[in-house]
Every structure is written in C-alpha cells, then in structure tokens.
Amino acid sequence: MTNLVKARNLSKRFGKVQALDGVDLEIPEGRIVGLIGPNGAGKTTALKALLGLTPFTGELEVMGLDPRRERHRVMQDVCFIADVAVLPRWLKVGQALQLTESLHPRFNRDRAEQLLAASSVRPDSRIGQLSKGMVTQLHLALVMAIDAKLLVLDEPTIGLDIIYRKDFYTTLLNDYFDEGRTILVTTHQVEEIEHILTDVLFINKGRIVLDESMERIGERFAQVSVGPEKAAAARALQPLYEQEMFGRKVFLYQDRAPEQLAGLGETRVPGIADLFVAKIKGAVA
Amino acid sequence: MSTMTTLLRRETWEHRSIYIAPAIFAGLFVLLALLAAAGAIQIQVSEPGVDLDLRSMIGSMDARQLGALIQTGLASMAVFFNVVVLLVTVFYLLDSLYAERKDRSILFWKSLPVSDLAVVSSKLLTAAVLIPLISAALFLATAVVVFLIAGTFALFSGSGIVFAVGPGAIADTMITLIYALLVQSLWYLPLFAWLLLVSAWSRRTVLLWAILPLWAVAVLEQMFLSTHMFAELLRERLVGVFPLAFNTKVDEVEWAYSGENADMHLSLTESLRHLIDPGALLFSPGLWGGLVAAAVLTAAAIWIRRYRDET
C-alpha cells in the first residue's frame, strides 16, 4: 500500500501559538481518514500545509511532491473543499464548469453535469445568488467529477441544513469513494462521519495524540458501564477516562485485556466522540 | 483551450468593466455623431476672429485636406478613449489580486492545478495586451459607425468626399493607434507591475498603498537631498512615451479659409502613420530599465501570491 502523504516533524508557529508541533503522519491510499481535534488544535493548519497553502518547517511529501514549491502539480491529484464557501460569487455555474474543464486535466464535465442535474442548482445562476447548501452541492459536484487520488475536506458541512449534511456524506460514499481514492476529512460533528471513517487522527495543541485504524480502535479501546459497587475495582485498572451516566459509572480503557474487564460490567467499543473526549480531557487531567 | 486563454477569459468574466466602460464611452461618441448629423448640435470652430461651422469647413476642403482633418478628429477621439481605458486598467490591476483574497475565493483558485506564475502573468497580460486590444476593437467599431453617419450626412448634402477618404483615414488611424497602444503598454509595464504588486500585498485601501509610497519617496528625497530625481522619473514614466515613440511635424497639409466671418489657417499631418518612429524609444534606457523593473515587481507579486497565507 502506498502512502499518499508522508509528513515528518511538521511544525508551524503563528506568533506565540505553536499551531503544529512536530506532527508525523502518513496517509495510505484507499482510506477515509478523519482528522479530529478541538478548535485551534491545528487541523486546518495541517491541511493547509498539505495543500501548499501555508509555509511550515519539516518534511512533507504529497504524491511524492513538496507542496510548498509544487502546489500546482500536487493539485492535479488532490482536490479540496475548504470550510467556507470559497467559490467566487461573480462566477456563473456554467462558467465554473467551463473553467474547471479547461484548467483541470482530470475533470469530467459530463459527470459534473449529471451530478448537478440531480441537484437544485441551475446552470445559468450566478454563485452569489445560490444558497449556502446549493454552493456546497455545486462545489461537491465539481470535485466529484475530478478523477483525483486524494480529496481533502475541511469542515465541509459547516453551516449546512441537516438534510444537506446527510446527503453530502451519502453522495460521497456511494458515488465517489472506491479503493483508488483517499479522503481526508476534518469536522466538529464527529458522529456525522464516524460510520464512514477507516482511520482516525486525533490532534490537540498541534500534536497528534492518536493515529489508529477503526479496527484497531475496536481492539485497543473498551468502554465499560459499571455499577457503583464495582467502581473502585474499575478505577484500579487505571481507566483513561471516567464519566457518570444514569447513576452508573462509565469507564474507558486503553490496551486492557478483555478478560480483565469482563467481570466489571457490560463492555463495548467506544464511540469516536467518547474516545476523543477521553483522549483530550484525559490528557489534561 | 489553453490555460492562458482560459485565464484571460476568466478576467473578462470577473472584471466586466474592462469592456463595459469603453463601450459606454464609444456609445457617447456615436450619440454625439448622430446628434450632429441630425442638426441637434452644431460643431463650430470659435476663436477670436473665427466663427466657422464644421460643414462649411469641410465644404472648402479637398480630399487630402479632409483626410488629414478626419485623422486629427479620430486621433483626439482616441486620446479620450485612451484616458478612460487607462483608468479602467488601473482599477482592474488594483483589484486583480486583492479581490480574490478579500472574498477568500483564492482558496478555490488555488485548488486548481494552475501555477501562481500563470495566474499573475494572466493579470499582467490582461492589462498590457487584452485591455488595449478590446479598446482598439471598440475604437474601430466606433470610428466606422461615426464615419458611416458622417458620410451619409455628407452624401445628403451632395458630397461623396467623406465616403471617399474615410476608409483610408480610419486605416491610417488604426495602424497608428495599435502602435501607440503597444509602446504605451511597454512603457507602462513597470507601473502595471507595481499596481499588481500592491494588489497582491495590500490588506486594505489598495489605491492608497499604490500612491502613498511613491509620493513618500519623492517627498523624502526632496527633504533630505533637495533633489527631484524620483519625481522626475515618475513624471517621465507617466508622460514620456509618446515624445519618444513619435516624431512631430512631417509632411504637413496646409489649409486656409478666408471668408466673411473667418480667416483661418490649419496645418495638419497628412497621415498619422508617418509620425511613427520607434528609434528613439528602442534606444532609450527608460524602456529597457522599465522592463527590468517590471520583471522584478512581477516576480515579487508572484512570490507573495505563492507564499503568503492569510486565509
């Protein structure tokens, strides 16, 4: 399996803030990787470094190229949708298609038109007149019609209605993703993408705190709901995190043998959101 | 379609003023010609001792004289046209790399596999080549329409002379205009590149940043060195090209009119084309120095667009 992205000791500082603090990461082909972190953790900065949009220190290869110097070549194989509607407001939908067709060698116009026909976006509208949801539909149609290896999405559904949000990921998964493609996505709404991810990267204060595939998360982490009478025994096993729920204690463990936990109570694989809270808050405590 | 053609087309989509403003101006000329032909306005030469309307003036001319007069008229129209087009160019350039940062659409543009070199070059080419070409085409259309109006009017007054000499005069004017636009673009290239750099760099009040540093350098030089070299350099840059690129006073056509309300004498250039003389320009250090400055300023604009991150 080839790695599309290889980063070694990626660092970036904005004045006093260390936005990226020695990030190492690899993104293999054919995965859907969620980059998850609190506000200001360095998610967007990391993505911008990959896309050649911001200067940084450290080693970085995207498709074997240095995005700092060869952004335009990297962009032949990488698409991205940023966290804000960035399509120019003066552009018409038809012009956007024409432009992308002549500037992007891997763009398939018929495909984009097909995707747009299924949406409520009309080809003669100016982008400034479209709703935010429609602009996102248009941008997604443009991007999905590009035969790219890596798709980078930075909070793509922020500010969208719930209906659009669900459609966004469904369309992406059903009509776009296959073993030849890789998606890197950041979002606040972890629950929204949890079921489509194959890998997660947790980032906090500019550092990667967890880099694991979903299968391995099932193996390494366990959440146990414990009655109050066994709480002391549960604590003795040094949980990562503890919270109270409906009068029961819920403990989250990392790298504990299943037989150790079996006696405590009902065991299950934690959700990404719970794991995230445990990793970030647990690190603070 | 090639990348550059697409990028140039994109500029006309975004900045529609680069053809709308000269088109409006062209429309005004046509309107003026129509009003004159309909007799609603009268074009009159009024100087001390002279009171002569255009019609009697034309009536007294032979083909050579009239051809020269038409060219002079077209040349003055071209000068007005050029002023409008230059203003449009200044505002186009100031907006060209600033607007995409202001509305953050730069993130979309940078998601396309197009280099910053190509993008910035397309903006400079728009200012130096595309806008002059659009304005020359609009000027030609205006000249032809005005000529048809004037010719038809003259025909009704019983003279085919305007139709006879008009096409040659328009052709001569167009050749001269295209040459003038070419040398003007070459001479102004460092100014264009400076505006491009300000547009790539400035966070707000672009126009102020375009003017203020130049003004400050001139003022500081006068304060500390009591010299005016920079101010002189700027003045030369703004108005110096046509004296270098054209010679004056060749093969003149004399015309004299003597009548009861006027006594008038004109000397006109027979053909504007004969004024073209690029020798002095090609050997002037100003042209080549300017082109070097333009290259440096453009490279700086490209560098800023590539490496600056403010989104």
Image: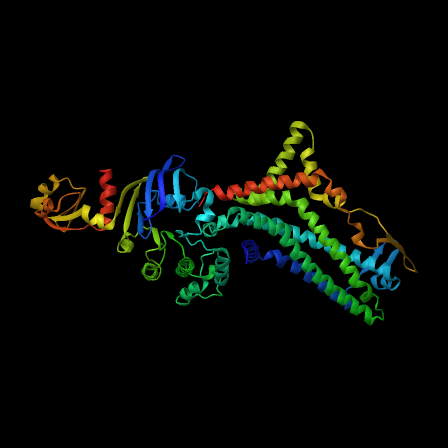
- The picture quadrant where one finds residue A192 is bottom left
* One can see residue B91 in this view: no
Residue farthest toward the top in the current orientation of the protein: B224
Would you say A128 lies left or right of B52 here?
A: left
Residue farthest toward the front in the current orientation of the protein: A1
| Along the line of sight, the residue nearer the viewer: B99 or A49 | A49
Q: How is the image coloured?
A: rainbow
Q: How many marks?
A: 0
* One can see residue A194 in this view: yes
Would you say A33 lies left or right of B96 here?
A: left
Q: Position of residue B245 (x, y in %)?
A: 75, 46
| Along the line of sight, the residue nearer the viewer: A35 or A6 | A6
Q: Position of residue B178 (x, y in %)?
A: 71, 54
Q: Position of residue B242 (x, y in %)?
A: 74, 46
| Along the line of sight, the residue nearer the viewer: B8 or A167 | B8
Q: Quadrant of the C terminus of chain A?
A: top left
Q: Position of residue A111 (x, y in %)?
A: 42, 64
